[in-house]
Amino acid sequence: MSTLDLGLVGNSRTSALIDRAASIVWWCYPYFDDDPICCSLLQSDRQHGGFGEIGIGLEGGSAREQRYERNSAILVTGFSDGAGNAIEVIDFAPRFYMHDRLFAPAMLVRIVRRVSGRPRVVLRVRPAVGYGSAPSDMRCGANHVSYTGATQAMRLTTDVSVTDVTEERPFFLHDCITMLFGPDETVNGAVHEVGRAFYEKTRNYWHRWARNLDIPFEWQQEVIRAAITLKLNAFDDTGAITAAVTTSIPEAPHSGRNWDYRYCWLRDAFFVVNALNRLGATGTMEKYLDYILNVIADAQPAPLQPVYGIRRQATLEESVASSLDGYRGMGPVRVGNQAYFQVQNDVFGSAVLAGTQAFFDTRLERPAGIETFRNLERLGDRAVELYNVPDAGIWELRRSQRIHTYSSMMCWAACHRLGVIAEHLGLADRAACWNGHASRMHAEICKAAWNEKLSSFVSTFHGDRLDASLLLMAEFRFLEADDPRFVATVHAIERHLRRGDFLLRYDEEDDFGRPESAFLVCTFWWILALAQIGERDRARALFANVLGKCNHLGLLAEDVAIDSGELWGNFPQTYSMVGLIQCAARLSTPWEKAY
């Protein structure tokens, strides 16, 4: 049975998920949003074992342990049997500088080492095409096998007998073997030496990258793992950062809440920029800001969408991959995401909040100026026009539209930050204009979204329901953290949405019924809000509980089952890893008081 006990390997160009038995169960090749040549994660039990997976087995043995090499994206899986035979499998995607340029091809490297005894292993290389609809065609050479039928052919170059690979014959492992999975091109050099060099250079790259991170005193390993995961979800070519590397892992069992998350949501922009800034990951942040600002420029004169493709594609037509039964047989498996044409008015604030960093961060090679400000003002104009107009909201309701408090607040944030930027640029008249809009909007939101009976802000104008996004009012500086209305709202949300030590995003019927699982980032928002209102001890206890739900490698999905604590939803979820980074930074003992 599939689980989310998976490790992520990648290099910001390609990425794959590997299970505890060292099987590559999900790999979109060559890039994040392409056809998965490994797709067994979304195959039911009846489909398993045919094709759509790259695996390995130790005759008479099984996998015993799995870990990342320290401060790296290199995954190691250990196998052993009861007779003293043991091997380890090392998986990674090459990433390092060569000839003063970054080398990060759409390639995975697998090195299998003998640890002890006389182990006998078997290799299974069974890529699929067409979202699991058929096996790849195979063409053999002297030291390689090419797998074709997908958009781009994949070649395995190896020092293993090609017959042992294609016929899956067990063989004795005397020392080590190397498998290079990548473009259908000739590899220059001996396979073993190429693999060894790639391994050493990639390990050194990640060690240098981790050394430059700005991390809190507490929870250092958890933050480093989250930071590396965030880096792996970034697409180097454009700077986009995907919400996750998977599609259609259900948010809860048999819920039908199966979505394709291999795209870039603008609503994540502020949080991602904030986390990257905290980490000091300036290069990744600057590329991401470039992506956001280019998307804004692309959108003229079209409306700004909630989500875009990793290459800034605007159209993400949604379809169903009927050849895949789905995670544990819980389909459908969706390709594309129809949220791209939804009306979500919070996007204006999300984009402006993210872009604000570019005006004030002097580390950036390309600080923003007047032209960028003019582009952002266009978003501000839309925010003024639409702040009190119904939309689908942050939770992307598909069949209803209301005036959502969060969307209105984000429109306010767009105007407020434009005022701040204008003052910074010395544009007094524009600052006065935007500050005026922000002041007027703030007054209306405070009046229309406050429910006197509940003593709380509510999720829609003149409504009586709450949702977790209201916890961000202080984070966005809409209210001060010590404002009695914010404190009361935090406590009201606890009363209505708390389930055990987690928080629902909302508790009302939507297009798919009533939510059953806890959206992890909402629990992180709750933790941040508690810290802001002075309930630090409670916040730390809740944070420790969430950390206990990470899988064995420190990764989080989108959701958690409230009763069992099992992870659900697309994986690994950028939003969740960003929430972990933010909470650790907010709650940790400062370095200057650590010892």
Image: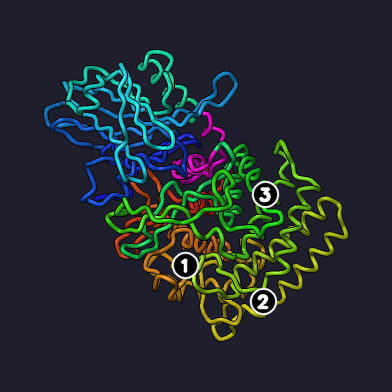
Q: Quadrant of residue 89?
A: top left
* Residue behind mark 2: 446
Magenta span has 211? Answer: yes
> In the rendered image, is residue 66 in sight?
no
Of residues 370 and 138, the one nearer the viewer is 138
Say whether disc 3 or disc 1 marks the residue closer to the N-terminus: 3
Question: Compared with residue 523, is residue 183 higher up or lower down, i.e. above or below?
Answer: above
Q: Amino acid at mark 2?
A: Cys
Q: Quadrant of residue 221?
A: top left
Question: Compared with residue 500, is residue 573 higher up or lower down, i.e. above or below?
Answer: above
Q: Position of residue 522 (x, y in %)?
A: 48, 62
Q: Position of residue 203 (x, y in %)?
A: 45, 27
Q: Secondary structure at mark 2?
A: helix
Say whether disc 3 or disc 2 marks the residue closer to the N-terminus: 3
Check the image and name the residue furthest to the top.
Answer: 189
| Left or right: residue 148 compared with residue 310 | left
Kindly indicate whether the residue at mark 1 contacts the one at mark 2 (C-beta within 8 angstroms): no
Mark 1: few/some/many CA within 10 Å (<14, 14-19, 20+): many
Check the image and name the residue furthest to the bottom.
Answer: 453
Mark 2: few/some/many CA within 10 Å (<14, 14-19, 20+): some
Q: Residue at x 27, y 28 (%)?
A: 88
Residue 298's disc is 3
What's the coloring here?
rainbow
* Residue behind mark 1: 505
| Left or right: residue 589 compared with residue 6 | right
Mark 2–mark 1 distance (CA, rounded to whole Å): 21 Å
The stretch in magenta equals 207-235
Of residues 456 and 113, the one nearer the viewer is 113
> In the rendered image, is residue 94 in sight?
yes
Q: Residue at x 61, y 61 (%)?
A: 475
Q: Secondary structure at mark 3?
A: helix
Q: Amino acid at mark 1?
A: Arg
